[in-house]
Image (tube, rainbow, N blue to C red):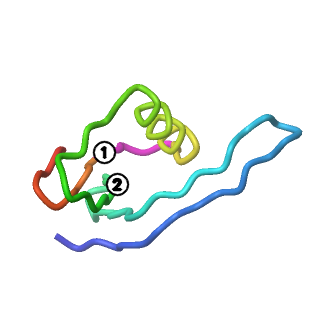
Amino acid sequence: MLSKEYIWFTRGDEELETSGAQIDLLIERRDRIINICEIKFSADEFIIDKEYDLKLRNKIEAFKRNTSIWYSTYDDYNLWG
């Protein structure tokens, strides 16, 4: 499938009370689906706790547009999708 791959970031805006966000890898597919990929290196199993979950949700909300989004997280040991 044809795709475009890139990173994405936005700065926060104090007046709008929004925080900045950075996405490690976006895969924009020809079928109009965008995979948001979070890439982590960890010597041990990586656990998504409540605080990290909020950071991920902020990234998704900052990026959302009128498109379908699949969120994928990659680390050295596992693949979540």
Magenta stretch, main secondary structure, is: strand
Q: Residue at x 35, y 73 (%)?
A: 4
Whether residue 46 sits left or right of residue 23 in the image: it is left
How many discs mark residues in the rendered view? 2
Magenta stretch holds residue 23:
no
Disc 1, SS:
strand
Front in this rendered view, residue 7 or 41: 41
Q: Residue furthest front?
A: 43
From what the image shows, is residue 74 above or below residue 45? Answer: below
- Amino acid of disc 2: Glu
**CA distance separating discs 1 and 2:** 8 Å
Disc 2, SS:
strand
Q: Position of residue 69 (x, y in %)?
A: 35, 44
Magenta stretch holds residue 69:
yes
Dividing the picture into quadrants, the one containing residue 27 is: bottom left
Disc ID at residue 38: 2
Point out the stretch of residues depicted in magenta: 66-71
Q: Residue at x 84, y 42 (%)?
A: 14
- Amino acid of disc 1: Tyr
Front in this rendered view, residue 59 or 2: 59
In the picture of the structure, the residue carrying the numbered disc 1 is: 71
Mark yes or no: residue 34 visible: no
